[in-house]
Amino acid sequence: MRRPWMLIPLVLFVLLLVLFLKALNDKKTQQDLAIDPSTLPSALIDKPFPDFSLPSVEEGGSLLSRADLLGQPALVNVWGTWCVACRVEHPVLNGLAEQGVVIHGVNYKDNTEDARQWLKEFHDPYQLNISDADGRLGLDLGVYGAPETFLIDARGVIRYKFVGVVDERVWETQLGPRYQALVDEGAAP
């Protein structure tokens, strides 16, 4: 062993490997490292829903704007006919709408005629449905893709963002309680 200094990189590598393996075994570290795509951060939480002026998906639909979303808490669901996951969540949204949950749609980067046909075939849970064909509103919202659902209060302030399929579990554990709290807040004298 004429060159013991050559072993330094090997010793450092082994030391780092041991530290890395110890960190992986630490439960808190595993939770910290877990990535949940439904909790992607949004810089828009507690900020007003972006201003926009876009056509409605409905045939002969008028221009819609942020002002049309105001007045009551609502879910704003970003969807598209090209989105397989949107088809999975759509029956849940229909059920929520039947229960009186206010839902607005943002038809994202889609053909409006395809969207109309899709809603005719699978039913329309949206009170308002915004056609965002070029994706500009989606960009302003920081949309990663579809489906994404925003919860807004009666003043149009974004209170929560959920990325992924809204299913019964998501409604019961995440969106539903937040939505109901906003509804109750508005009903309080």
Image (spheres, helix red, strand yellow):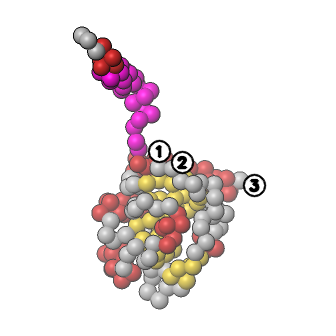
- Label 2 secondary element: helix
Magenta region includes residue 34: yes
Q: Which of the two residues, 141 or 16, is positioned nearer the viewer here?
A: 16
Is label 2 in contact with label 1 (beta carbons under 8 Å)?
yes
User: How many numbered markers are drawn?
Assistant: 3
Q: Point out the image quarter for the C terminus.
A: bottom right
Q: Mark 3 sits on what residue?
A: 189
- Label 3 secondary element: loop
What's under tag 1, amino acid-wise?
Thr
Q: Mark 2 sits on what residue?
A: 177
Which residues are the magenta region? 9-36
Judge the density around disc 2: few (<14), some (14-19), many (≥20) Cα neighbours within 10 Å.
Answer: few
Q: Which of the two residues, 7 or 146, is positioned nearer the viewer here?
A: 7
Determine whether, in the image, residue 159 is placed left or right of residue 94: right
- Label 1 secondary element: helix
Query: How far apart in space, not on screen, are marks 2 and 3 (Cα)?
Result: 20 Å
User: Residue 179: image x %, image y %?
Assistant: 56, 54
Judge the density around disc 1: few (<14), some (14-19), many (≥20) Cα neighbours within 10 Å.
Answer: few
Numbered badge on residue 173? 1
Determine whether, in the image, residue 187 is placed left or right of residue 95: right
What's under tag 3, amino acid-wise?
Pro
